[in-house]
Amino acid sequence: MTSVTANAAMPLLVIASSLIAGLAIFFLPEERVRWRSALNITAALIKLALVAAMLWGVANGREYEARFALLPGIDLMIRADAMAMLFVALSALLWLLTTIYAIGYLEGSPHRSRFFGFFSLCVTSTMGIALAGNLLTFFLFYEMLTLSTYPLVAHRGTAKALRAANVYLTYTLAGGAVLLVGVVWLYSLLGNVDFTQGGMMRALSRDAHPQLALIFVLLIAGLGVKAALVPLHGWLPVAMAAPAPVSALLHAVAVVKAGAFGIVRIVYDVYGVGFAASMGLLWPLALVAAITMIYGSLRALMQDDLKRRLAFSTVSQVAYIVLGVGLFGPLGSVGGLVHLVHQGIMKITLFFCAGNYAETLGLHKVGELNGIGRRMPLTTAAFTAAAFGMIGAPPTAGFITKWYLGLGATEAEMPWVIALLALSSVLNAAYFLPIVYAAWFKSPSDRWPQEARHGRFETDGRLLWPAAATGVLTIAAGLLAGTAMSPLNWAKFIMQLEYLQ
Amino acid sequence: MSERFAPLALALTPLIPAVFAMLSAWRPTRAGCVRLAPLAFFPAFAAVLPQSSDVWLGGMLLGTHLSLDPTGRMFLLLSAVTWTIAAMFARAWLADDPSHARFFGFFFGAAAGNLGICIAHDVVSFYSLFALMTFSAWGLVLHRRTAQAYRAGRIYIALAVLGEAALLAALLLIAASGVTELADVPAAVANSSARDVIVMLLLIGFGVKTGVIGLHVSLPLAYGATPAPGAAILASAMIKAGLMGWLRFLPLGQDLPGWDKWFVMLGAAAAFHGVVVGLLQREPKVILAYSSVSQMGLIMIGVGAAFAGPGAHELALSAVAVYAVHHAFAKESLFLGEALSRVARSRHWVLAGLALSAAALAGAPFTSGALAKHMLKDAVAPMPWADVLSNVLAAAAVGTTLIMCRFLWCVWRAPHVTSRGATGQAVVPWGLSLGAVLATGFILQWPAVSLTSLIDATWPVLLGVALAIGAAQRVRTSLQIPPGDILVPLERVLIAARKLSMPRMQRANLFLTWPAGSVERIERTLRSWNVVGLLLFLLLGLLLLMLAVQ
């Protein structure tokens, strides 16, 4: 039945830290700003400390696992393995930064208790997704994420926001339904679907293979909605109507990441990468990713709204993760997996910066950013670092991803992927460099649309420092990729486990 | 001392300029950075001197390895000298420019990359530092923020991104064989199944820097738009970074059939194209840019010779290295002198100095150019059509003389504004660069003087000068080719194509607006409830199917 030891308590506490904070915030009166902020930050810090401890433990071979029987023979399972920790560490760190950012961003606006309540729930679900030890647990938290994100997208209550939330729900619920079919079908075949390194399909007879292929398609299609794979990506650009911290959550911390992470789990820990490759399931995945990469970039080129451009860029960038999964071989897998982290820190930087431009000076369009570098140098520096990261220029995090994907392409005998990566670099440069160039070198207009003064820095410190921090991380993750605790090394550590099976 | 400090000097060579670049962006340290600018290159000099040493930084990038081999030492010396002189000149030249700190920020960034690639010994570090240099130099091109600078910047970055992408693809194909160290790269390329693709990608990727014909179009625009010290360093050290890339990555001496001919032909084409188009220019800096296209073409012939096979390639490599040093010093001196000539009080002296550098570039006897050309001639001797090639080289020497005469003439005729406070201080670095040109000539020349080599060096220069004088008196042409030559019609075609494909669209949002509408519609359809309903219906069908299977 229930087994909770000290090691089992750790992952549960990680989930509970934001759950409890979230519930408490719901009951906090709107005007208790200090209490709410203190609660938010404390919870985020506690979570980060717990995650750090667990990261150390997992690196040293400790196991953290908790099981609860849901039905006879069907367990809810929470477990922190190396793969889970990659996502948990990313989300915990970015949650802290996004919380600080959101406190500054929403200052003085209504319904903040509701916002931060759902915000915490959203992160709770993400932690659950990351730490889920079997497919059912994963699915439950995955749907919980859908529901807890809806009020955040709708938060502003404008017609545009409501429509965005509606589209979001349409897509994700439909995706969830498809996913459910796949999950149920798989359970009916296997009885129990625990995430196992190397997968658990080899035990099945060959007769089941056609079914397994069909289930694979269902699972990927269901997860592909959140991961914004073309043609299931339509909700993402619409959802940019949400406030900037929510965009950060959607694009970097939680939602698209949950979809991509789900695909990673399905391929590596349910099917097993070797098995999936032998069934010929990986190359179609790589192809879909390739189409998504190029399509997303082309659409990003067409956008004049900064956040919309960033949204299409996410469509393109998350496909890198899926591409890495689709490249059979440890190098490609490392590239895909490490991009889970890299894409997160780079994209959150860009959305923080876009939010800063909008909040501080009322700038929303790409064409309005002329000369912004002089007015907001630190924000623009962070934006520049992340933009170069997206292009994949060294020494940023994006380069490390591209390098491993490229090496993986040869390993998987798909050399066309190298051409694709080069093309993607060029396209990313085509829609990011004009912004960078206009920001630093064009002359600013005489007056900004809506200038708000914020203390002694270029903008409110709570908006500025998170952006600066993730900007620094973007460079550090690339420049110091060879160090022991870099995302790259962690991804290598995971892949060692997956391919040894 | 050298034993212990050599690794430190090696590590600091790119690091100190990088730190300077960052400090130039910060208000409190800005002025200090500019004042101490030349000191940023001290570690590079310190690293050139001692015996070889290795630095391994496992945590940096994918494991960084810094080291100094003979090729690297040559290029590091070349870069350290030219960057120091450019820094001194920039400090004086831009003293009145309110945004000179920004110039120095990009200047140091490019310097860190350029000095770094001389000592980088692993593929990823080389690529990273090369990219740092390329993107930082964009800031130098844009510095003046005029319409001319914006256009030059656009062309520069478009080609640079193309080059970086080609390079990334090439390096990925190389690294796929498990190679990480630069020393193992040429052999890996030679044995790779994608050998020809890799060589072509390297030709393009580094060719954007060296100005391979067709990719050379950004050079005249960039040199014209960049402030003098920036143009000087672009034309001297940074253009050599592309050459350095070829020397590091190409399988030279491995006997690659076909590629030697391609390099020689492309080089020869650039050598003549540069001369012909350069002669039709009026702006002195643009003339110098075309001269660079031409000179890099000659160097490319040397690189082609190095393909020829083992044995011959040693000779070709030393010729290429000497030519690179010679061209870097002479070109920097020409760019700095040209700038000074516009403001100096005693122009005659500046013109005399320019004439000296020009003579060196043309290969007059007792100059570095004479030896460089001589060595190049020896290098091509074992090649299949050596006779033709030696005639090509001689003709190119005549062409260089002509283009230098044209340059001096245009400098002489250029508008002149005396009195500028900073001129006095700018004379010193220019003098140093002139000294570097002369010193290289003397140091390299002593063992090589012979009567035949004297004659070989003399006649093309004399012929060139005679032709120039004759032409100045007789030839009057209104023919002009705009800077960037083939780029100009290309730009027109692009603009016309854009107009044709979307007649009524707003100009502000030109890029791909036409397909946007229809794609938008498709996406909206996908978002509608009907599609979702259909999806659910299909799902139900699947469920039934699943039950049937069970």
Image (cartoon, rainbow, N blue to C red):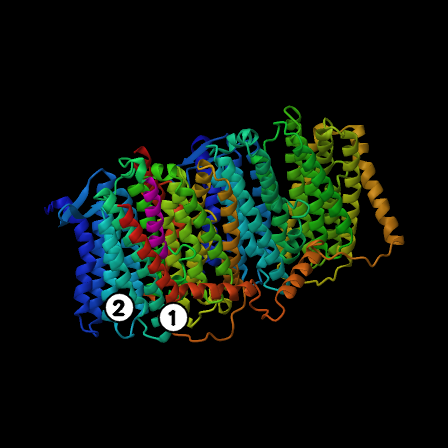
Q: Which residue is mark 2?
A: A115
The residue sitting at 36% across, 40% down in the picture is: A276
Q: Give the side of residue A317 with respect to residue B183, left or right.
A: left
Q: Position of residue B30 (x, y in %)?
A: 47, 58
Q: Please name the residue that numbered disc 1 is placed on.
A: A359
Depth check: A211 or B283 in front? A211
Residue A453 placement, left or right of A188:
right
- In the rendered structure, which amino acid carries the disc numbered 2? Phe
Q: Are marks 1 and 2 on the same chain?
A: yes
Could you tell me which secondary element the residue under label 1 belongs to? helix
Q: Position of residue B285 (x, y in %)?
A: 69, 54
Going by the numbered disc 1, the residue's amino acid type is: Glu
Q: Which residues are magenta?
A: A209-225
Task: Between label 1 and label 2, give the one nearer the viewer.
Answer: 2
In the rendered image, residue A222 lying in the magenta stretch gets the answer: yes
- The percent position of residue A38, horizontal first and vertical second, equals 21, 64
Of residues B495 and A69, the one nearer the viewer is A69
Judging from the image, mark 2 belongs to the subunit labelled A
Mark 2 secondary-structure assignment: helix
Q: Is residue A89 visible?
A: no
Q: Residue A74 location in percent, x, y? A: 17, 47
Horizontal arrangement in the rendering, residue B374 relative to residue A346 (left or right): right
- What residue lies at 22% left-to-right and 66% top-to-bottom? A117
Label pair 1/2, CB-CB below 8 angstroms: no
